[in-house]
Image: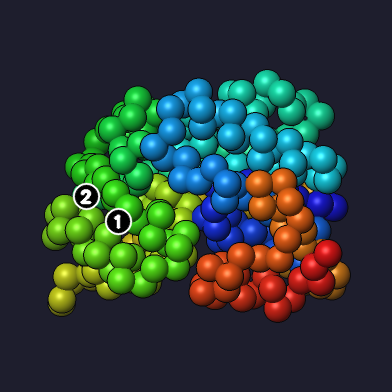
């Protein structure tokens, strides 16, 4: 079995690790777009074209499912990707975990890129799944880019700016960009008021990985023998994991346990 993941940058690492944990025997194809990143400032039409190029590079490796491990691409490019690749290749988008976050009764904050914050897509999810709770949408300009560059100082500045916009009574924070899961503990520390119950962070990596296995007709086998291979595509070119990816535990884990080719 082979699962492909795509993103503009290294935001696909958490979902890749989630797939690896569910199926240690699954080959992984990671398709990124360093030549075209960042995707956030692009028009929806331009973003869809970049996403199609990255998806085609992954599809050439004949995976059993393709995870669009990017919230912004899922908002703007998912219909185009599915129109071209399905039904031959199942395409799984990334949906912010608003529903489970709201199930606790709120209040909830949704951290997302400026391109996703306030979008009709996100507002629709809030209306459908969190209409009865207090929700604060928190734009996080620069955070995804800082994570992609593994720029420690820029990450700290972006997290602090978003935390300042997050109400102190928030108990659940939705990580509405896949990159944010790579710095989840920094976010938790920034939004945790002293003496209050722990703030719960809600990412999408685990749910997306499980859905990819279902769409591929597979079941989780976390005890399977680790025998998978890792293929990395940078704007279509086979490569090693980017150096920036190795600044995060997820990247180091994938490199350590994956025979690459």
Tell me how far mark 2 sits from mark 1, CA to CA: 7 Å
For residue 240, which quarter of the picture? bottom right
Q: Check disc 1 and report the residue beneath it.
A: 172
Tell me the crowding category of disc 2: few under 14, some 14 to 19, or many 20 or more residues within 10 angstroms, Cα based: many
SS of the residue under disc 2: loop
- Which residue is rendered at x = 72% and y = 46% of the image? 236
Discs 2, 1 touching: Cβ within 8 Å = yes
x and y, in percent, of residue 122 in the image: 36, 33
SS of the residue under disc 1: strand
Q: Is residue 46 above or below residue 163?
A: above
For residue 215, which quarter of the picture? top right
Tally of marks: 2
Tell me the crowding category of disc 1: few under 14, some 14 to 19, or many 20 or more residues within 10 angstroms, Cα based: many
- Which residue is rendered at x = 80% and y = 68% of the image? 260
Q: In the displayed structure, does residue 218 sit left or right of residue 241?
A: right
Q: Check disc 2 and report the residue beneath it.
A: 107
Q: Tell me if I can see residue 100 in this picture.
A: no
Q: Quadrant of the C terminus?
A: bottom right
x and y, in percent, of residue 129 in the image: 37, 35
* Viewer-closest of 218 and 231: 231
- Which residue is rendered at x = 73% and y = 36% of the image? 56
* Viewer-closest of 130 and 88: 88
Q: In the displayed structure, does residue 128 sit left or right of residue 215?
A: left
x and y, in percent, of residue 78 in the image: 57, 29
- Which residue is rendered at x = 81% and y = 71% of the image? 259
Q: In the displayed structure, does residue 10 sit left or right of residue 239?
A: left
């Amino acid at each position: 079995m082979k699962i492909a993941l795509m993103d503009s940058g290294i935001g696909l690492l958490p979902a890749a690790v989630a797939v690896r944990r569910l199926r240690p025997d699954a080959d992984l194809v990671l398709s990124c777009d360093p030549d075209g990143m960042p995707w956030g400032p692009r028009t929806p039409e331009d973003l869809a074209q970049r996403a199609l190029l990255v998806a085609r590079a992954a599809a050439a490796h004949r995976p059993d499912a393709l995870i669009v491990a990017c919230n912004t691409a899922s908002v703007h490019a998912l219909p185009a990707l599915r129109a071209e690749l399905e039904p031959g290749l199942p395409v799984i988008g990334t949906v912010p975990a608003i529903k489970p976050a709201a199930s606790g009764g709120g209040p909830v904050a949704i951290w997302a890129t400026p391109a996703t914050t306030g979008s009709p897509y996100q507002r629709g999810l809030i209306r459908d799944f969190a209409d009865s709770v207090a929700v604060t949408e928190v734009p996080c300009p620069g955070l995804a880019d800082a994570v992609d560059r593994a720029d420690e100082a820029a990450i700290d500045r972006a997290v602090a700016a978003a935390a300042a916009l997050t109400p102190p009574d928030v108990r659940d924070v939705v990580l509405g960009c896949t990159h944010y899961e790579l710095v989840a503990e920094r976010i938790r520390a920034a939004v945790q008021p002293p003496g209050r119950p722990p703030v719960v962070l809600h990412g999408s990596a685990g749910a997306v990985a499980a859905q990819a296995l279902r769409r591929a007709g597979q079941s989780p086998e976390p005890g399977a023998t680790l025998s998978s291979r890792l293929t990395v595509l940078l704007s279509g070119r086979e490569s090693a994991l980017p150096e920036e990816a190795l600044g995060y535990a997820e990247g180091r884990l994938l490199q350590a346990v994956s025979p690459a080719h």
